[in-house]
């Protein structure tokens, strides 16, 4: 079937409605819940509300936000806090490289991409990978922006709820809410029908706990580096065998 035959959304209004329908469901619910946990931990760690909201909007990735929160509470210098947050969210580089070409169109000003990439998250990445084959290229940026703005609004809302509700939320409950998001990511990636994502999940799920037991400090980075490289190699090999 050709790409043209797959297109279902070829006008701006239908794409906007689709993005709102996709975002105003489990994505925004999970983000509000997980960012509620982060807001609680942020206040417990001595953050002001402005610092908590800035980290949500500026970092926009829970692993990096948690790294910054924990290291700030431990009194680590700013240089190492920034380095830890950057390493924890290093996944955004390959995500951006693979995602931005999908929303590029000759009628768009590419300079806006530097701003728009800040809205990227695993939610918008997975939703885009799943929906873009049915959306005309010129309207993909609209879908992405609408979906991402709804998600980041939910994330900021959850941060505020958690920040002011910290007294009613014990630390284990806050951590439990935070871990809802990785579980949702797993479901999103599994449902993206991307062979590369499914292979990465199959490899990463067992490797994560194993590397954490070997080294809690470096386990996440090792899982991403080794597991991701292995998944990439297997995907390349799998694709070549299909040719």
Image (spheres, rainbow, N blue to C red):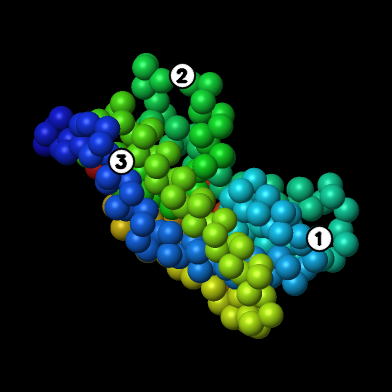
Please identify, in this view, whether the residue under mark 1 or under mark 3 is nearer the observer: 3
Q: In the image, is residue 102 above or below residue 195?
A: above
Q: Quadrant of the N terminus?
A: top left
Tag 1 residue = 72
Question: In the rendered structure, are the residues bearing label 2 and label 3 in contact, judged by CB atoms less than 8 Å apart?
Answer: no
Tag 2 residue = 109
Characterize the local packing of mark 2: few (<14), some (14-19) or many (20 or more) Cα atoms within 10 angstroms. few
Residue 29: x and y in percent read 43, 65
The answer to whether residue 27 is left or right of residue 31 is left
Tag 3 residue = 16
Q: In the image, is residue 122 above or below residue 8?
A: below
- Quarter residue 158 falls in: bottom right
Characterize the local packing of mark 3: few (<14), some (14-19) or many (20 or more) Cα atoms within 10 angstroms. many
What residue sits 69% from the left and 80% below the top?
Answer: 167
Q: Secondary structure at mark 2?
A: loop
Residue 10 visible in the snapshot: yes
Q: In the image, is residue 140 above or below residue 44?
A: above
Characterize the local packing of mark 1: few (<14), some (14-19) or many (20 or more) Cα atoms within 10 angstroms. some
Residue 203 visible in the snapshot: no
- Rounded to the nearest angstrom, the CA distance separating label 2 from label 3 is 20 Å
Residue 146: x and y in percent read 40, 42
């Amino acid at each position: 079937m050709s790409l043209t035959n797959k297109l279902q959304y070829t006008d701006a209004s239908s794409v906007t409605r689709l993005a709102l329908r996709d975002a105003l469901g489990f994505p925004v619910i999970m983000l509000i819940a997980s960012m509620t946990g982060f807001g609680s931990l942020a206040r417990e760690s001595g953050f002001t509300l402005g610092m908590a909201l800035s980290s949500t909007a500026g970092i926009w990735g829970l692993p990096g936000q948690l790294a910054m929160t924990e290291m700030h509470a431990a009194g680590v210098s700013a240089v190492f806090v920034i380095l830890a947050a950057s390493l924890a969210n290093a996944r955004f580089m390959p995500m951006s490289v693979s995602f931005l070409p999908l929303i590029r169109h000759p009628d768009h000003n590419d300079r806006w991409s530097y701003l728009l990439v800040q809205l990227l998250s695993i939610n918008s990445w997975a939703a885009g990978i799943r929906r873009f084959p049915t959306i005309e290229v010129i309207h993909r940026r609209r879908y992405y922006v609408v979906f991402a703005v709804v998600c980041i609004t939910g994330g900021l809302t959850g941060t505020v709820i958690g920040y002011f509700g910290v007294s009613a939320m014990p630390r284990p409950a806050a951590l439990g809410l935070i871990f809802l998001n990785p579980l949702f990511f797993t479901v999103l990636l599994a449902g993206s029908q991307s062979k590369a994502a499914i292979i990465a999940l199959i490899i990463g799920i067992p490797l994560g706990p194993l590397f954490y037991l070997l080294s809690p400090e470096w386990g996440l980075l090792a899982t991403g580096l080794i597991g991701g490289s292995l998944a990439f190699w297997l995907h390349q090999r799998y694709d070549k065998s299909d040719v």
